[in-house]
Image: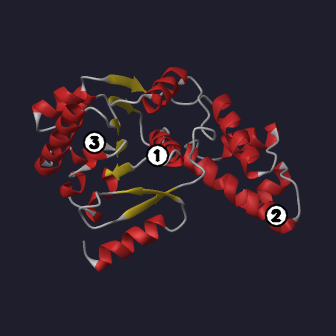
């Protein structure tokens, strides 16, 4: 990996603090830092208790397992993978997180040796559909994990495995073998609860009327809502004012 690529990854990682490895000790050590506020405790479950139970169950096992879940972009799949990495890292286990939407920063060989980790998370697998080298690398990793039997493998996509338009039929077949879940989108009421949960974890209160005002006036994608909430938290601290609808309008220029 070039110095320029390392600089890109450093800028991408600079604001977060859960460290995992993109590759193995036998290769260049390249840590990736994940958001420390994306944990299971900060995830509002909505209609996804079965998925959360399956994830927690997989992490609690002492042997390998495979689970695939999918949602549209912004549905919370990366949050859950980050949460899984954080939980296993807190136990002192070695984990790997591979965000395939950032694959221009690394190469398929990054997967070599990951079958020796306690947890491997592959995010946004739809991004490599039709890319033969990546598809074969993931297929080979899957088979090595299956053979050794000690690694928990979590994979996310934006659709079910059979609809990924993969060029390698055997990979599509493998991805369809295990537990498969759809990450159900949050209702507006759930999004309000999720924002209030995040506010509480950050140490401030989000009144219900303010939360519903934000849902009406902003893009309902959760990352947008959370980023806006963080912005309002900073503005509230700076102005020494509580969150009210008039203050929100002023702070956001609405």
Q: Is 3 on the left or on the right of 11, as rendered?
A: left
**Residue at horizontal 34%, vertical 65%?**
30
Q: Assign the N terminus to one quadrant of the image.
A: bottom left
Q: Name the one closer to the observer, 137 or 30.
A: 30
Q: Secondary structure at mark 3?
A: helix
Q: Is 189 on the left or on the right of 147, as rendered?
A: right
Between label 1 and label 2, give the one nearer the viewer: 1
The alpha-carbon separation of the residues under discs 1 and 2 comes to: 31 Å
- Which numbered disc, 2 or 3, marks the residue that appears first in the sequence? 3
Residue 85: assigned label: 1
Q: Quadrant location of residue 168? A: top left
Q: Secondary structure at mark 2?
A: helix
Between label 3 and label 1, give the one nearer the viewer: 1
Residue 126: assigned label: 3
**Residue at horizontal 12%, vertical 51%?**
133
The alpha-carbon separation of the residues under discs 2 and 3 comes to: 40 Å
Of all residues, the one furthest to the top in this rendering is 50
Q: Quadrant location of residue 147? A: top left
* Residue linked to disc 2: 237
């Amino acid at each position: 990996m070039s110095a320029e690529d390392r600089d890109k990854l450093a800028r991408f990682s600079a604001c977060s603090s859960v460290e995992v490895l993109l590759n193995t000790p036998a290769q260049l050590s390249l840590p990736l830092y994940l958001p420390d506020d994306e944990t299971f405790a900060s995830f509002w479950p909505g209609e996804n208790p079965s998925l959360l139970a399956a994830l927690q169950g997989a992490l609690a096992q002492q042997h390998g397992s495979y689970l695939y879940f999918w949602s549209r972009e912004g549905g919370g799949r990366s949050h859950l993978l980050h949460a899984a990495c954080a939980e296993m890292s807190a136990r002192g286990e070695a984990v790997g997180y591979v965000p395939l939407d950032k694959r221009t920063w690394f190469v398929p060989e990054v997967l070599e040796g990951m079958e020796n980790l306690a947890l491997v998370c592959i995010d946004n697998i739809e991004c490599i559909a039709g890319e033969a080298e990546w598809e074969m690398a993931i297929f080979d990793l899957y088979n090595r994990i299956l053979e050794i039997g000690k690694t928990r493998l979590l994979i996310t996509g934006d659709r079910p495995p059979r609809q990924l338009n993969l060029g390698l039929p055997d990979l599509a077949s493998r991805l369809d073998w295990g537990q498969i879940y759809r990450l159900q989108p949050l209702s507006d009421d759930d999004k309000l609860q999720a924002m209030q949960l995040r506010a509480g974890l950050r140490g401030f209160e989000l009144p219900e009327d303010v939360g519903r005002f934000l849902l009406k006036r902003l893009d309902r994608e959760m990352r947008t809502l959370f980023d806006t909430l963080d912005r309002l938290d900073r503005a509230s601290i700076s102005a020494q004012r509580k969150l009210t609808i008039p203050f929100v309008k002023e702070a956001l220029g609405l």
